[in-house]
Image (cartoon, helix red, strand yellow):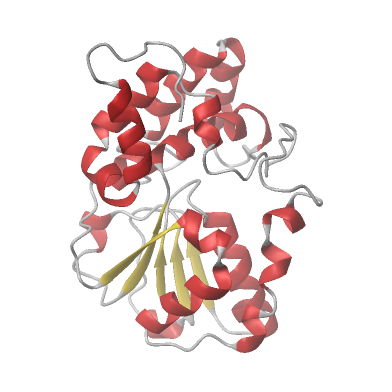
Amino acid sequence: MLFLTHHKCASAWLSGVLHSYYAVQCSQPVLHSHRSDEFPEDCAAYRYLLLINAHYPFLKDKLTRAVHVVRNPLSIVVSSYFSHLATHPTERWPQLAAQREKLQRLPKAAGLEATVQFLSRPQGFHDEDGVMGPLWSLRHFDYDDPRILTVRMEDLVAAPAAVLPECLAFLGAECPADLLAQLSQHSFEAKSGGRKPGVVDTSSHYRCGDPSDWINHLSRDCALGILRDHAPFMNRFYSGSAALLQRHALPGSSAGPLSV
């Protein structure tokens, strides 16, 4: 079973759910990789593969079926900004350590713009040159490849008991009942110490949990720039956010804060 995702696109959630069941409970061999250029020669040796910074041009001739988890680019930027600013571990990630120093010197608006640039790197995003930034990878994926089921992170984490069985069925596997029984351990409330989604704690790696929180932080110009760079993807998978931003791009529209 092959799962593809990207930095800040439920990579930790997927890792927690799959690893705790297949690796820990079932003692089956699994493979997690943050590299964009890694794929095992013997896939059958693993119960599942989770590629956390997936790169479609590298994978397209290697995969048979895969589930690809994506996220609203606007949310990726905001989530990354706060995570990179304070909470994400920097061990073995010197690029992030340097980025954190930069973000801590910048005002918030400039820091968000710097985060867009950091996430858009085609290489050198992590400690190896072969790791691609998530925004770059999302722009260079073939969403019409019939071998790949694209799933929105927002849907997966909101209704995992419904979406995860669909993912496993696409991969030709059943979803074990005892795996479903463990999903509550991986909810936002469980991971955040009891907070409801939308209740913010900036000191927590699980800061907010609200998929619309980007509206509270991105400037109009920054958000419109992200939309321009990801318009086909946004119109296809996040049409509500795209429509909101397109209203603000019309002549005569407000140049102030975004509003729903």
Residue 10 locus on image (x, y percent): 52, 55
Residue at 32% in and 37% down:
242
Q: Is residue 21 left or right of residue 219?
A: right
Q: Is residue 126 left or right of residue 105?
A: left
Q: Nearer the viewer, residue 98 or 9?
A: 9
Q: Is residue 119 above or below residue 62?
A: above
Q: Is residue 209 above or below residue 188?
A: above
Residue 183 locus on image (x, y percent): 66, 71
Residue at 62% in and 88% down:
177
Q: Splitting the image into 4 quarters, where does residue 171 fall?
A: bottom left
Q: Nearer the viewer, residue 219 or 93?
A: 219
Q: Nearer the viewer, residue 173 or 162?
A: 162
Residue at 63% in and 64% down:
16
Residue at 28% in and 69% down:
148
The N terminus sits in image quarter: bottom left
Q: Is residue 190 left or right of residue 3?
A: right
Residue 200 locus on image (x, y percent): 71, 35
Q: Nearer the viewer, residue 51 or 183?
A: 183
The C terminus sits in image quarter: top left
Q: Residue furthest right?
A: 193
Task: Confirm whether residue 138 shows in the render.
Answer: yes
Residue 158 locus on image (x, y percent): 57, 60
Task: Confirm whether residue 123 shows in the render.
Answer: no
Q: Splitting the image into 4 quarters, where does residue 255 fall?
A: top left
Q: Splitting the image into 4 quarters, where does residue 133 fall?
A: top left
